Image (cartoon, rainbow, N blue to C red):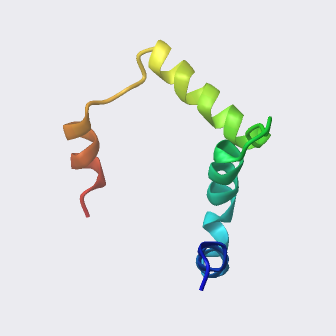
Amino acid sequence: MTVRESVHQIVDNIPEDRLADVLDYLADIQDGEETLRPETATAIEEGLADVREGRTITLPEYRRTRRV
């Protein structure tokens, strides 16, 4: 099996809800002038605004909130 065939096989098995992430990643590493999907760019800008406005928590705080 070639590397390309292996990649296709992996992509075919990625859950539907993760495909947008894969598309963004592939666009990022592709040679060319690909850009992020608008939803991804918006999410990044919102995250950066949160950091600028101090709406952050420490990693230990985050881990405490994620425990089940």
**Extreme-front residue of the structure:** 2
Q: Looking at the picture, tell me which residue is in the foreground, 43 or 53.
A: 43
x, y percentage for residue 47?
54, 29
**Extreme-bottom residue of the structure:** 1
x, y percentage for residue 53?
48, 13
Q: Residue at x 68, y 41 (%)?
A: 40
Q: Looking at the picture, tell me which residue is in the foreground, 28 or 4.
A: 4
Q: Is 51 left or right of 26, judged from the image as shown?
A: left
Q: Identify whether 58 is placed above or below 34.
A: above
Instruction: Answer with the quarter of the image where residue 12 lies.
Output: bottom right
Q: Identify whether 33 is placed above or below 64.
A: above
Q: Residue at x 80, y 35 (%)?
A: 33
Q: Looking at the picture, tell me which residue is in the foreground, 3 or 22.
A: 3
Q: Residue at x 64, y 45 (%)?
A: 29
In which quadrant is the C terminus drawn? bottom left
x, y percentage for residue 23?
70, 56
Q: Residue at x 59, y 78 (%)?
A: 6
In which quadrant is the N terminus drawn? bottom right
Q: Identify whether 4 is placed above or below 68.
A: below
Q: Is 30 left or right of 48, judged from the image as shown?
A: right
